Amino acid sequence: MARSPGSTGPTLAVVAREAGVSVPTASKVVNGREDVAPDTRRRVSEVLDRLGYVRKPRLEAPRPPALVDLVVHSLDGAWSGAVLHGVEAAAHDAGLEVVVSAGLPRTRDGRPERGWLDKLCDRGSSGVLFHLAELTPTQYAWLDEHRVPFVLIDPGPVPPPGVPSVGAADWQGGVSATEHLLALGHRRIAVIGGYRRKVCSGARVAGFRSAMAAAGLRVPLAYVRYGDFREAGAYQRMTELLELPEPPTAVFVCSDPMALGAYRALRERGLRVPEDVSVVGFDDLPQARWTTPALTTVRQPLSEMAATALRTLLRLRAGEVPEGMRTELSTRLIVRSSTAPPAHISS
């Protein structure tokens, strides 16, 4: 008589002993394995029925969580924190979990590191979001070959045709920053951009040039400088501007960390912000509010950009084709205490 599932039945070792086989062989029969001789299978099955061995129901393996990968240039700094916040919020709404990697592991010849790519496939990621990551042609080709959907957040160099990206309206931000300084009465306005090859840097400087041209003002070549989006580089560029025979009365610095470098260069020269030189930044990171004087800056919606990128990724995953490969979110000028009319006007 077969025992009920809730009762105590014979162990697999008892079944194996009665059938004259090993425990592994009995286990193969119980689990339906094919690598057992027909006579052995018949003998074990008869013992199973006679002793009333109850096969334990197989438990379905738990479904792995739905995942999305986020690769950021670095985990340091407020940029990455804002992007991670935006991705996590949007992922929560979509029922996804986020796997974060700092930098894209790669081999010496620039190819994606095999281990990272294998893990990406094994865990069944819904796709990848890249923030400030510079992908090589080989990496683009791998993602395309393996049909891994991906979206770039605030890309560095101009991405190849057909690659979706989300960024800020950098050109308009550059226009807004410059128009603000012009409205205060400044005419000798300089700009410190980031890396020349960065999409956002070029757009911000282009917006500056456009606003100056619209005001009928020529920009001296020496008034256009480029740094590396870091404080130290902007400190050097600001120092060079102050050494000009006719230094600027205002400067548009294309990131908040660089604006802090400009502050330091001015302070070391005994110059005050904004009484002697007005400064406008770009980003509206937390330090823009904490520094003294509080920094007038252009706010780019980093968290919203990240959330938009995730939603775009999910649409790609569902087979939808976006209307355009580039999505830009609006920027907004935030006026604080680092800008004022030039001294010759305010006095």
Image: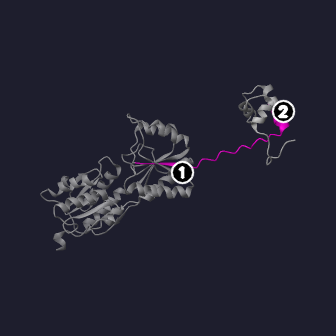
Q: Nearer the viewer, residue 273 or 50?
A: 50
Taking the image as shown, residue 346 lies to the left or right of residue 145, namely left
Q: Dot 2, crowdedness within 10 Å: few (<14), some or many (≥20)?
A: some
In the image, farthest residue toward the right? 1
Image position, residue 301 (x, y; %): 41, 60
Q: Which residues are magenta?
A: 44-72
> Is the C terminus in the top left, top right, bottom left or bottom right quadrant?
bottom left
Residue 52's place in the image compared with 320, above or below, is above
Classify mark 1: helix, strand or loop.
helix
- Left or right, 306 with respect to 4, comes to left
Quarter of the image that includes the N terminus: top right
- x, y (%) of residue 20? 78, 28
Does the stretch in magenta take in 223? no
Please determine whether, in this image, residue 120 is positioned above or below residue 24: below
Badge count: 2
Q: Which residue reaches farthest bottom?
A: 347
Identify the residue at horizontal 48%, vertical 55% (top origin).
Answer: 87
Q: CA distance from mark 1 to mark 2?
A: 54 Å
Q: Which residue, given by chain and number where applicable, does mark 1 sit on? A: 314
Amino acid on which disc 1 is placed: Leu
Residue 276, x across and y down, in percent:
18, 66
In the rendered image, which quarter is residue 94 located in? bottom right
Q: Are marks 1 and 2 in contact (CB under 8 Å)?
A: no
The label on residue 46 is 2
- In the rendered image, residue 50 lying in the magenta stretch gets the answer yes
